[in-house]
Image (cartoon, grey):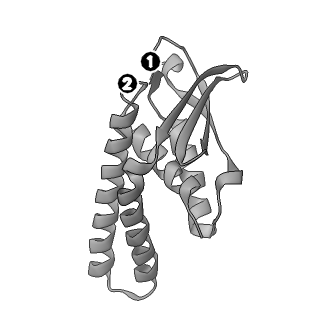
Amino acid sequence: MPDDCRISRVTLDEGTIVRWNADIDHERKVAIFDLVDGNYFAPRGGNKGPFHLLLSIEERRLVLDIRSEKGDGIDRISLPLGAFRRIMRDYFAVCDSYFQAIKTAPPSRIEAIDMGRKSLHDDGSKLLQERLADKIEVDFPTARRLFTLLCVITLRG
């Protein structure tokens, strides 16, 4: 992966996060680790990385604040969250079912719920990739990890 088309660091605006538990914190850590470990992230306009990405929610919009590794501002992209609401609502519901099921449900039930969870996650990732397409080129694995982080920072109690 070219060094100039990657994220080297991710920061979440923890002020926008209302609810965290051990499972969510684990998902956040894994998504950030995996994202930094391998990603393709190429902002349109010829800016070269590696990049430091700050993610936040402002006025019902996802904000991607793209900076150089030194902290210099490169670009600030804002996406309305409306298009993601249904997918995220369904995804959160299936995730809640999954975390309940792993406590007592038979393996076949857990597997079925997990397949639905992965499918919704894929749908959200594809939507994010599409919404970013004219601003940032990202590969699908990068979009998946970014969608996970989007979900983390939009959780409400």
| Residue corresponding to mark 1 | 44
Q: What x and y, as percent, mark residue 88?
A: 41, 59
| Residue corresponding to mark 2 | 134
Q: What x and y, as percent, mark residue 142?
A: 43, 38
Which residue is farthest bottom? 104
Q: What x and y, as percent, mark residue 59?
A: 58, 46
- Amino acid type at mark 2: Asp
Question: At x 44% / y 18%, what residue is drawn?
Answer: 44
- Amino acid type at mark 1: Arg
Mark 2 crowdedness (10 Å alpha carbons): few <14, some 14-19, many ≥20: few
Separation of residues labelled 2 and 1 (CA atoms): 7 Å
Image quarter (top left, top right, bottom left or bottom right) of the C terminus = bottom right
- SS class of the residue under badge 1? loop
Q: Name which quarter of the figure residue 7 lies in.
A: top right
Image quarter (top left, top right, bottom left or bottom right) of the N terminus = top left
Indicate whether 154 appears above or below 57. Answer: below
Question: At x 33% / y 77%, what residue is drawn?
Answer: 110
**The one of 25 and 45 positioned closer to us in this rendering:** 45
Indicate whether 37 appears above or below 31. Answer: above
Question: At x 62% / y 61%, what residue is drawn?
Answer: 25
